[in-house]
Image (spheres, rainbow, N blue to C red):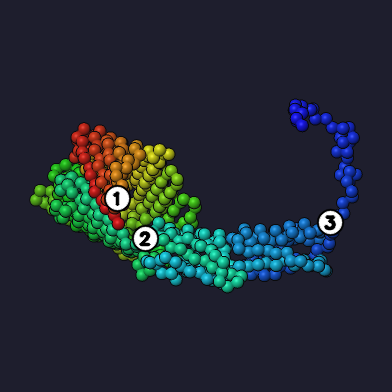
Amino acid sequence: MTPVPCRAVRLPLRLHPLVLALAAMPLPLFAQEAAPAPSVNINEYIVRGNTVLDPRQIERAVEPFLGPGKTLADVEKARDAVSALYQQAGYQSVYVELPEQQVSGGVVLLKVQQTPIGQLRVVGTKHESPERIRERVPALAEGKVPDFDQAQKELTALNEGGRRQVMPLVREGQVPGTMDVDLQVEEKSPWRASAALNNDHSADTEKLRLSASLAHDNLWRRGHSASIGVFIAPEDMDQAKVFSASYTVPFEGTPWSLEASGYKSDSRVLNAGGQGGAGAGTGTNVIGNGHSIGLKLNYRLPGSGAWWRQLSLGVDFKDTEEDTQMGKDSLKTPLKYAPITLAFVGVRQGEQDQLSINTQLVAGTRRLFGYGSDAIAFDQKRYWADPSFVALKADVANTHTFGSDWQWYARGSLQVTDAPLVSAEQFAAGGMYTVRGYLSAEAIGDYGGLASLEWRTPAWSLWSGTDLRVYSFADAAYLRLRQPLPEQRDKYNLASVGLGAQLRLGEHLQLRLDYAWPYADGPVTRKDDPRLHFNISTSY
């Protein structure tokens, strides 16, 4: 039979008046009378199996579900409230059960199923003590019900520094009713080494500078760190020779650490940028020797997302001696003093921004534990200088990376004081790392500021493991002296623009070139006299 073709017809939606009337009636009149849920009088909830929460917390959580006329829904809400307490406290492995029971005497039983750690293993570590890693994560100790929120905080602290990554892997325990946890460790060698060769030299000295350092971040497998460094002028080591060392001891299980550091310098600087006091600009020779020993107490502030922050309070016992030669005359100017420094360091690693903040409040002391030169020695070292000086120093830098890998870099630095300072505490500008186009530390002042801006291209891959980034830059600085001598120049304004490039060769070698045009005369550098800076560095 041939099907009869049908044509779709759209009908208007109309309800019968009777249907509308039924829909408007209250439910009990429309349907059969529903049986009411059985209700009971609940006087008490007994919670068995809890060993980690304060019983008073549980009492407060179930209190709204006590009293007459309570139904099964109320009991389930009480169970959920207790379960939420465990979740909020970080005990995600705990389960609250409502067993089958006859409610008699108004008492309801809730059973808590706590899953403790059966076995905690450390897997993959080569340079770290497995016992120490376990000690650093007490929230995952064997036999304990794991607090995963606290464990996350402890693992974050354990992973700080970027040289070690510890990740927990949870699995069913070999013993029924337990869970086993493996702490999987990925780590780098605790040894670090670096070296650099550049031409960032000061006035009237050989052009090359060589620096090298060696460090270990996990001595004795206890997290102690030590470093040694050297900085020299390889063409004439009498012009610049500095040795330095540091040692840091962490206080286990706390954010505190103690750091000792020191340096010894032996250098001869000729015509030091015209900053030689009464002999400025007259061919003054300064022969400098000195050393410093410092002790610093560090406190790592609690982590906050991408931030790493640290406060420190320290003292440096400084001993400097200079021979200032003016023609045939020579004047020795030894000086001892012990400034106290309160510092804050913050680093933020975001998805697009890398921000660093470094601030210091430096306060001189007249005599600390009997150590220090008198006011006369300070006055001989620098006219009107005083051992009770105060200086505020700050440095802020940020690198912003756009989605296309273009980068914008900005840095600002300043120093503020209301008194003349001795040379070791002054603010210096000029050179590859402050104002390019000028000699290193060419201009010096008691107070001042500097700024640097860079616009960087995306990193171009030349071949495997090698990339090149080109940038333009602008640098500027101003420096001022407090209470200058009549023959001293008391202010400098430095400025430059230029082009630069940074080439990365594999993971360990970098080459940097900066070509800068000075826009103002400095103590040595003349305006529009371009200068090429280079730096070759390697790190392991």
Q: Nearer the viewer, residue 136 or 457?
A: 457
* Mark drawn on residue 506: 1
* Mark drawn on residue 145: none
Q: Residues within 10 Å of mark 2 (few under 14, many from 20)?
A: some
Q: CA distance from mark 3 to mark 1?
A: 74 Å
- In screen coordinates, is 196 left or right of 417? left
The amino acid marked with disc number 1 is Gly
The amino acid marked with disc number 3 is Ala
Q: CA distance from mark 2 to mark 1?
A: 17 Å
Q: Residue shown at 86%/54% (left/top)?
A: 36
- Give SS at disc 2: loop
- In screen coordinates, is 509 left or right of 172? left
Q: Nearer the viewer, residue 483 or 116?
A: 116
Q: Earlier in the sequence, mark 3 or mark 2?
A: 3
- Report x, y in % for residue 393: 36, 48
The amino acid marked with disc number 2 is Lys
Q: Residues within 10 Å of mark 3 (few under 14, many from 20)?
A: few
* Mark drawn on residue 37: 3
- Give SS at disc 1: loop
Total count of labels = 3
- Report x, y in % for residue 107: 79, 67
Please say if 198 is above or below 261. Answer: above
Q: Earlier in the sequence, mark 3 or mark 1?
A: 3
- Report x, y in % for residue 275: 21, 45
